[in-house]
Image (tube, rainbow, N blue to C red):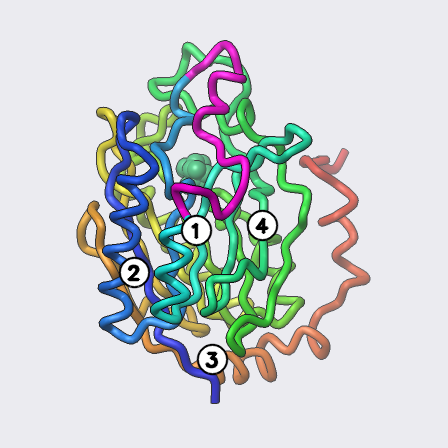
Amino acid sequence: MTRLIVGGAQMGPAQKADSRETVVARMMDLMREASAKGVGMLVYPELALTTFFPRWYMEDRAEADFWFEREMPNGATRPLFDLAAELGIAMTFGYAELTPDGHHFNTSILTNRKGEIVGKYRKIHLPGHVEYDPERTHQHLEKRYFEPGDLGFNVWRNEGVLMGMAICNDRRWPETFRCMGLQGVQLVTIGYNTPSVNSQNGGEGLKERLFHSELSLQVGAYQNATFVAGIAKAGVEDGNPLMGGSVIVDPNGFIIAKAETEGDELITADCDFDLCAFGKSTIFDFARHRRIEHYGRITAQTGVIEPR
Ligand code: ING
């Protein structure tokens, strides 16, 4: 039987003026709280180390490099890795990655309980736009500052559990979960930074956004018989609200832990990963039930082609 207490380290806002060190200190406080509750795997949000800088238009993209990490771990994050190894906690967190050959990704890493990086994911589904959009109340310039991820959706056997990573907007695309489901995933971690209001669709408010986030995470879990941890960076960053709503979902799609605030808040769930087996061997026994000869359109087409 494989069992881990999974922790979701929801984080409150990171202001533009906050140093990496200040934010890492908060992450370490959450890790100590997690350790006291027996957490073995701790999930932090997307872009955990900094404010959600893609909300800011910078004409010179090189200016945005200030928000990127050139190596991981690095001076600011090494204390977090050392604490994780000391406490024996595996973790995942997101950050902006600038590679030695100059590529920019919205990245997350996965470590084992010894603080060693065992996996890396680069965000594939980038929402938003490239150029300044005067029509929008808030800019969302992820397509300006990041390239689409080039590592695919992978799953790693980490501490006896098949774990996969995705980031924020990825949760809105079923392909994300299925690609990992086809690798037997038992825990999908998804950090997110989701604005509380939609800069384009006036009608969609916080309530709808929270609903769509939970809907996406629950259906991804259920249809792939996997646990899912969706963990937010939340609260108001320099006047810009991000929603909370962090949850841990079980393989039947039920929410088993949920954050109540928009600040630094630890949620936990005692996860028996053998619970994934029932769905994977019955309703969602992919080998027995899927009919791939009819799915070609999913990878043959990018956009819609309507019938004549
Ligand atoms: N943020 C948002 C997200 O996908 C968004 C952007 C919100 C897109 C709502 C569509 C609808 O949660 C990030 N960082 O992807």
Q: According to the image, label 4 marks what residue? A: 121
Give left or right: position of 29 versus 115.
left
Question: Where does residue 79 sit, x and y in percent of width and height?
Answer: 36, 52
Kind of residue indicated by mark 2: Met
Magenta span: chief secondary structure: loop
Q: According to the image, label 2 marks what residue? A: 31
Q: Which mark is residue 206?
A: none
Reply above or below: 142 against 131.
below
Give left or right: position of 179 versus 228.
right
Q: Earlier in the sequence, mark 1 or mark 3?
A: 1
Distance, label 1 to label 3, CA atoms, is 21 Å
The residue positioned 28% from the left and 35% from the top of the image is 14
Kind of residue indicated by mark 4: Tyr
Q: Earlier in the sequence, mark 1 or mark 2?
A: 2
Label 3 packing within 10 angstroms: few (<14), some (14-19), many (20+) = many
Distance, label 2 to label 3, CA atoms, is 22 Å
Q: Is residue 170 visible?
A: yes
- Viewer-proximal residue, 109 or 304? 109
Label 2 packing within 10 angstroms: few (<14), some (14-19), many (20+) = many
Does the magenta run of residues contain 62?
A: yes
Q: Which mark is residue 93?
A: 1
Question: Where does residue 132 sit, x and y in percent of width and height?
Answer: 47, 13
Kind of residue indicated by mark 3: Phe
Q: According to the image, label 3 marks what residue? A: 273
Give, as a single range, the part of the protein colored magenta: 57-77
The residue positioned 48% from the left and 48% from the top of the image is 73
The residue positioned 47% from the left and 80% from the top of the image is 273
Callout 4 secondary element: strand
